[in-house]
Image (cartoon, rainbow, N blue to C red):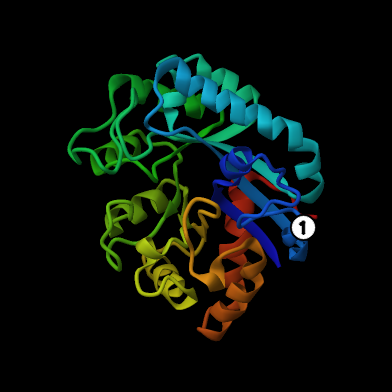
């Protein structure tokens, strides 16, 4: 199968463990991904809320250096796409976006769960939106060909981005109508991402999916996104190496089996192909082999 996944924390986990991605022991390794016909992976450069200012920027740069050391090997196995997860790494400096764009960052998660210079995350006051600096950053991202990621924003921040009229993604979230959670999206938010020509990356985290967090639960959320008009906007946003997953989904090598289970649950080959590959590949402009 072909797979385009919108979010993993593999870079952070591998750097923490001191291991390369080729034979990593977490959810993703190049060896285990060999089961895929074609693979595009968004690798997040995660910066925790506990770091601010220069410390946050340095943490980001260290992970980018770790990525650069493996870039050629990664590129032989997949199409790697870089994302910044938490724009506290900008250190309040708009020009940092240009530097990050030069280093290959294409998605920027504006906040994590707390507050930073751009705005307020999912665990903050839901009525406090983007700061003026945050709005400047979003506009500059679009100018640089980058895309803001709204997955960790609070509701007011989400609607601030939506009201600015450009593309956005929610790289790893699920449907609040099925599983009420501060990190999941309401139907109105899902429809706004669809209207913006963005992507909704369906996370496999059991707390977002509800139930056992297995294939049947992922299927419920995918059906719901499709029912809201998202057949061409739904993608996988696994959150590999960023959370504990149901054993049946805990690894990139499990995705062919998930594809088979979705087929058994009534999803057509066309819908599955769009979800696992085409929607993401079209969004990122990945040419067909």
Position of 85 relative to 263 (above/below): above
**Residue drawn at the location 39% of the way across and 42% of the way down:** 150
Q: Nearer the viewer, residue 111 or 98?
A: 111
Mark 1: secondary structure: loop
Residue 162 on image: x %, y %: 34, 40
Quarter occupied by residue 105? top right
The residue that disc 1 covers is 31
Q: What is the total number of numbered labels drawn onto the structure image?
A: 1
**Residue drawn at the location 34% of the way across and 62% of the way down:** 175
Q: Is residue 98 left or right of residue 21?
A: left
Q: Nearer the viewer, residue 218 or 225?
A: 218
**Residue drawn at the location 27% of the way across and 52% of the way down:** 182
Quarter occupied by residue 152? top left
Image quadrant holding the C terminus, namely bottom right
Q: Nearer the viewer, residue 143 or 98?
A: 98
**Residue drawn at the location 70% of the way across and 54% of the way down:** 29
Position of 112 relative to 35 (above/below): above
Residue 80 on image: x %, y %: 68, 43
Residue 139 on image: x %, y %: 42, 25
Q: Is residue 70 left or right of residue 212?
A: right
Q: Residue furthest front?
A: 17
Position of 155 relative to 208 (above/below): above
Residue 63 on image: x %, y %: 60, 31
Q: Give neighbour class at mark 1: few <14, some 14-19, many 20+ (Cα, 10 Å).
A: few
Image quadrant holding the N terminus, namely bottom right
């Amino acid at each position: 199968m072909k797979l385009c996944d919108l979010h993993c924390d593999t870079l952070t986990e591998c750097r923490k463990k001191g291991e390369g991605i080729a034979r990593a022991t977490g959810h993703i390794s190049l060896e285990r991904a060999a089961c895929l016909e074609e693979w595009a992976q968004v690798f997040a450069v995660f910066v925790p809320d506990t770091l601010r200012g220069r410390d946050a920027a340095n943490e980001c740069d260290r992970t980018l250096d770790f990525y650069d050391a493996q870039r050629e090997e990664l590129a032989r196995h997949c199409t790697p796409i870089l994302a910044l997860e938490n724009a506290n790494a900008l250190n309040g400096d708009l020009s940092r976006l240009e530097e990050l764009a030069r280093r290959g960052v294409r998605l920027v998660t504006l906040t994590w769960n707390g507050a930073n210079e751009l705005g307020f995350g999912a665990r903050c006051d839901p009525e406090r939106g983007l700061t003026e600096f945050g709005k400047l950053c979003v506009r500059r991202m679009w100018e640089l060909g980058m895309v803001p990621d709204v997955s960790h924003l609070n509701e007011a921040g989400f609607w601030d981005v939506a009201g600015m009229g450009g593309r956005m993604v929610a790289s790893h979230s699920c449907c609040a109508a099925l599983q009420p959670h501060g990190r999941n999206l309401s139907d109105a938010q899902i429809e706004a991402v669809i209207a913006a020509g963005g992507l909704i990356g369906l996370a496999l985290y059991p707390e977002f999916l509800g139930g056992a967090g297995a294939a049947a639960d992922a299927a419920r959320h995918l059906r719901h996104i499709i029912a809201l008009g998202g057949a061409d906007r739904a993608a996988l946003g696994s959150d590999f190496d960023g959370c504990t997953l149901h054993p049946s989904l805990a690894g990139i090598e499990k995705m062919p089996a998930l594809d088979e289970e979705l087929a058994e649950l009534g999803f057509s080959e066309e819908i599955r192909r769009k979800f696992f590959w085409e929607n993401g590949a079209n969004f990122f402009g990945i040419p067909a082999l």
